[in-house]
């Protein structure tokens, strides 16, 4: 009887074996690293953020059906937006989705950390980081394929161009102004 209990006890102790607790909040595995450890090494957390060194000072990383095939037919997707200080997510629209945006870090034009904003389907919208630090937001969209139409690119960056005299009349400015803007896209 005694030896049976001891055996059960040993078996239980054995079943408790586990990986040690993580020493940091998260560790995204770098499967391509040449360094061998007991598990995968972590990617640099700084590299996990979107690279905002560009003309608008923001980076959008999306998880739509194109990146995450399991979303197909489910009517949902996500985007993470990183904003440099005073960076903008330029005016854009999602033709197939309403959006709910939550500020995770920092301060956007009308939203503080934890603030939530909703953009109805098709509405043109934008954000601007009004803080001195990086800002981060997460957007949930009501389509697995919401579409992302950036207004400036769609109007001034088409190939072939919309003729500059048409845009000059539409925007009530000189044709050269239009040509200058088109040269940026
Ligand atoms: C971010 O993008 C800029 C411009 O394309 C590039 O020079 C820089 O190396 C990138 N930084 C990182 C961390 O990838």
Image (cartoon, rainbow, N blue to C red):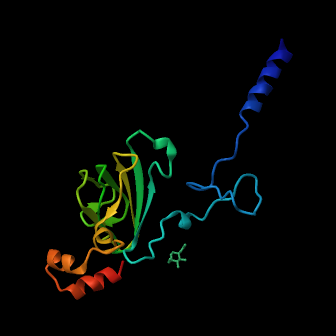
Q: In the rendered picture of this protein, how many numbered marks are placed on residues? A: 0
- Foreground: 122 or 37? 122
Query: In the image, is 35 to the left or to the right of 106?
Result: right
Q: Nearer the viewer, residue 119 or 130?
A: 119
Residue 92, percent across and down?
29, 63
Which image quarter is the N terminus in? top right
Residue at 42% x, 58% y: name it.
Answer: 80
Horizontal side of 39 relative to 184 (left or right) equals right
Q: Quadrant of residue 23?
A: bottom right
Q: Which residue is situated farthest in the top direction here?
A: 1
Residue nearest the observer in this picture, 183 or 101: 183
Q: Residue at x 39, y 49 (%)?
A: 145
Classify 126 as above or below 114.
below
x and y percentages locating residue 137 in the rendered image = 37, 59
Q: Quadrant of residue 84?
A: bottom left
* Residue at 78% from the left image edge and 26% from the top image edge: 11
Left-right relation of 96 to 1: left
Q: Is residue 88 left or right of residue 54?
A: left
Q: Quadrant of residue 56?
A: bottom left
Which residue is located at x 76 percent, y 52 percent?
38
Q: Quadrant of the C terminus?
A: bottom left
Above or below, comparing residue 74 to residue 68 in the picture: above
Residue 95: percent from left, percent from top: 29, 53
Outermost residue toward the right?
3
Residue 45: horizontal and vertical position, in percent? 56, 63
């Amino acid at each position: 009887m005694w030896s049976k209990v001891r055996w059960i006890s040993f078996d239980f102790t054995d079943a408790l074996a586990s990986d040690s607790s993580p020493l940091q909040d998260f560790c995204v595995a770098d499967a391509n690293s040449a360094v061998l450890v007991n598990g995968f090494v972590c990617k640099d957390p700084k590299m996990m953020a979107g690279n905002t060194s560009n003309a608008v000072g923001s980076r959008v990383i999306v998880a739509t059906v194109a990146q995450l095939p399991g979303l197909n037919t489910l009517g949902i997707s996500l985007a993470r937006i990183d904003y440099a200080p005073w960076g903008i997510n330029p005016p854009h629209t999602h033709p197939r989705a309403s959006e709910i945006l939550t500020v995770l870090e920092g301060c956007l034009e009308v939203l503080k950390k934890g603030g939530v904003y909703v953009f109805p389907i098709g509405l043109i919208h934008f954000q601007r980081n009004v803080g001195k630090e990086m800002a981060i937001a997460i957007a949930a969209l009501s389509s697995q394929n919401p579409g992302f139409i950036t207004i400036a690119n769609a109007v001034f960056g088409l190939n072939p161009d919309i003729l500059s005299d048409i845009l000059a009349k539409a925007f009530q400015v000189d044709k050269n102004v239009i040509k200058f803007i088109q040269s940026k896209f």
